[in-house]
Image (cartoon, rainbow, N blue to C red):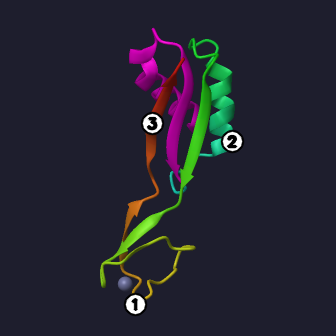
């Protein structure tokens, strides 16, 4: 399961804070990252007891894909694949949407 390996990577990132009591872990997930938020939540809840994080709540912020048009330089969020820029160009690069970031950790 892909989400379980994401949770394992997340736990590795949290290891330096293992001596503190974590209450909140916030991550940012791009909607093109192929990570299912519900499954991620499930995997986190499954492993958090053993990882000493029983009091921690996982908050997932899903971030839409953003692109930059190569023709006019405009930044926008396409509503779907094959969505053209306002200038009519289909030539754009992905600037955001595949990320998996640990953005916030809360302590008691
Ligand atoms: Zn454009």
Residue at the farthest front position: 108
Residue at the image point whose x is 64% and y is 14% from the top? 49
Other residues around mark 3 within 10 Å, as few (<14) / some (14–19) / many (≥20): some
According to the image, label 3 marks what residue? 102
* Residue 68 % position (x, y): 36, 72
Q: Residue 44: which numbered mark, if any? A: none
Q: Is residue 6 above or below residue 84?
A: above
Q: Secondary structure at mark 3?
A: strand
Closer to the chain start, of discs 3 and 2, is 2
Query: Is 89 positioned to the left or the right of 77 in the image?
Result: left
Q: Secondary structure at mark 1?
A: loop
* Cα separation between marks 3 and 2: 17 Å
According to the image, label 1 marks what residue? 87
Q: Residue 38: which numbered mark, if any? A: 2
Other residues around mark 1 within 10 Å, as few (<14) / some (14–19) / many (≥20): few
Q: Nearer the viewer, mark 3 or mark 2?
A: 3
């Amino acid at each position: 399961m892909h989400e379980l390996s994401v949770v394992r990577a997340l736990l590795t990132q949290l290891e330096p804070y293992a001596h503190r009591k974590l209450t909140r872990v916030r991550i940012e997930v791009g909607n093109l990252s192929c990570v299912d938020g519900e499954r991620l939540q499930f995997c986190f809840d499954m492993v958090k007891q053993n990882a000493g994080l029983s009091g921690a709540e996982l908050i997932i912020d899903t971030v839409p894909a953003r692109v930059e048009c190569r023709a006019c330089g405009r930044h926008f969020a396409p509503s779907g694949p094959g969505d053209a820029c306002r200038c009519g160009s289909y030539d754009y690069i992905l600037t955001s949407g595949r990320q998996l970031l640990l953005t916030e950790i809360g302590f008691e």
